[in-house]
Image (cartoon, rainbow, N blue to C red):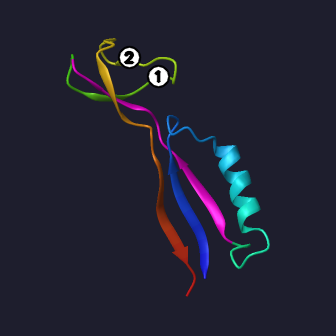
Amino acid sequence: MIKAVHVRLGPLSGVVEKSLSAAYELARDGTEFAGCELVVEETPIILHCATCETDCPAESIQEISCSLCGSQDVSVVGGRELEVTALEIEA
């Protein structure tokens, strides 16, 4: 029996955590997975700066620039995740 589903969710995935949780609850209700918990791990937006050649977190979704040098010559390398990372199974 599955006890929990672990999901990694980034702010640029296009999915709102509250909506995902609500949809999950509706989908599992009345099934053999009714007791299965959804565990959401939120991930930050990670930028790669071409100027200083480093990876750093974005200050916010509106502030997409290097937090170290201020350059806007960055590419998004993290924050788009929507993936199942683990299943907890009860023996």
Query: Where residue 76 sits: x, y (%)?
Result: 36, 30
Which residue position holds label 2?
65
* Residue type highlighted by circle 1: Glu
Residue 44, compared with residue 53, is above or below; it is below
Quarter of the image that includes the C terminus: bottom right
Residue 52 versus residue 20: which sits nearer the camera?
A: 20
User: Which secondary structure lies at badge 2?
Assistant: loop
Q: How many marks?
A: 2
Q: Are marks 1 and 2 in contact (CB under 8 Å)?
A: yes
Expressed as whole percent of the image width and height from the top left, the position of residue 28 reads 72, 68
Which numbered circle lies on residue 21?
Answer: none
Q: Secondary structure at mark 1?
A: loop
Instruction: Identify whether 15 is placed above or below 32.
Output: above
Q: Which residue is mark 1?
A: 59
65 magenta-colored: no
Q: Of discs 1 and 2, which sits in the foreground?
A: 2
Q: Looking at the magenta stretch, what is its main secondary structure?
A: strand
Q: Position of residue 16 (x, y in %)?
A: 63, 40
Q: Residues within 10 Å of mark 1 (few under 14, many from 20)?
A: some
The residue that appears at 32% across and 18% down in the rendered structure is 68
Q: Which of the marked residues, 1 or 2, is nearer the chain's N terminus? A: 1
Badge 2: residue crowd in 10 Å (few <14, some 14–19, many ≥20):
many
- Which quadrant: the N terminus? bottom right
Q: Residue furthest right?
A: 30
Stretch in magenta: 36-50
What type is the residue that disc 2 sits on?
Ser
